[in-house]
Amino acid sequence: MLDGGDRRQESAAPRRRPARPPAGPARAPSPAGRPPDIVALPDAGPEGQKAAPAPLSALTHRHLLGIQGLTAEEITLILDTARAFAEVSKRAIKKVPTLRGKTVVNFFMEPSTRTRSSFEIAEKRLSADTLNFSPSASSVVKGESLLDTARNLEAMAPDMIVIRHKASGAPHFLARHCRSNIINAGDGSHEHPTQGLLDAFTIRERKGRLAGLRVAIIGDLTHSRVLRSNLFLLKTMGG
């Protein structure tokens, strides 16, 4: 049994602090939760294996001239974005401010019902200001060229021009001469990229994927611009 002096000496002895762990990667959190001052490091995976690339967040092209040239990541980004906006059509108020302040010209040099009305309603639901160009009520009937017409439209400073034309390559021609973003709504027998994207969206919604699918296309295959866009898209996506 210790006397009072011994107890005072014992209490006066310095206490040793626990040794600090060596510096290094943060340890995994305990089951009770992760301490606020510890940040877990990402799993590096097997030696030599690279981390998966981050999902694409923006297209690498200013224009949408065709499916040919788009990567699988860009197509996936478009389809994922379309799925997010599909919910807008089910709302009581079918309008979002995504394109507020943007001006879109619908430059249709061929008759169209579904494509033109689809673009118009999409632009309105995204809050864009739209201008519908009709060749029968323009100087085109007097012989104005495509370039002259495009330059007249450019003077109004539109942000986007949606073009449908009977001549293959017309959207590419505008893309070389206009500052606006060009969207191909069908050019001759070349491509119809927006219809191809819509077909892919429908297939993916029903089947859950595009890769590995065998798709039969029936119709006027020789002159079909939709067929070409579908072929490019399905091949790129592994179908």
Image (spheres, grey):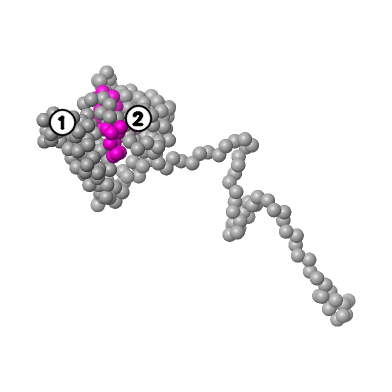
Residue at 35% over, 24% down? 231
Q: The residue tagged with tag 2: helix, strand or loop?
A: loop
Query: Do the residues under discs 2 and 1 have CB atoms within 8 angstroms?
Result: no
Task: Report crowding for label 1: few under 14, some 14 to 19, many 20 or more residues within 10 A (C-alpha).
Answer: few
Q: Residue at x 65, y 52 (%)?
A: 27
The reply, left or right, for residue 214 in relation to residue 152 is right
Q: Which mark is residue 232?
A: none
Image quadrant assignment for residue 103: top left
Does the magenta-highlighted stretch encompass residue 133?
no
Q: Quadrant of residue 112?
A: top left
Residue at 59%, 44% in the rendered image? 43
- Residue pointed to by mark 1: 144
Q: Position of residue 221 (x, y in %)?
A: 27, 20
Query: Looking at the figure, which quarter contains the N terminus?
Result: bottom right
Q: Which residue is mark 2?
A: 67
Q: Nearer the viewer, residue 153 or 79?
A: 153
**Residue 69 position within the rendered picture, expressed as x and y whole percent measured from the top left:** 38, 29
Q: Nearer the viewer, mark 2 or mark 1?
A: 1
Spatial CA span between label 2 and label 1: 30 Å
Considering every residue shown, the one lying at the far top of the view is 222
Identity of the amino acid at label 1? Glu
Counting other residues with Cα less than 10 Å from the Cα at mark 2, is it few (<14), some (14-19), or many (20 or more)?
A: many
* Residue 95 % position (x, y): 26, 50
Q: Secondary structure at mark 1?
A: loop
The one of 227 and 58 positioned closer to us in this rendering: 58
Q: In the image, what residue occupies the spot 41% across and 30% down?
A: 237
Above or below for 41 versus 216: below
Mark 2 / mark 1, whichever is N-terminal: 2
Magenta residue span: 174-197
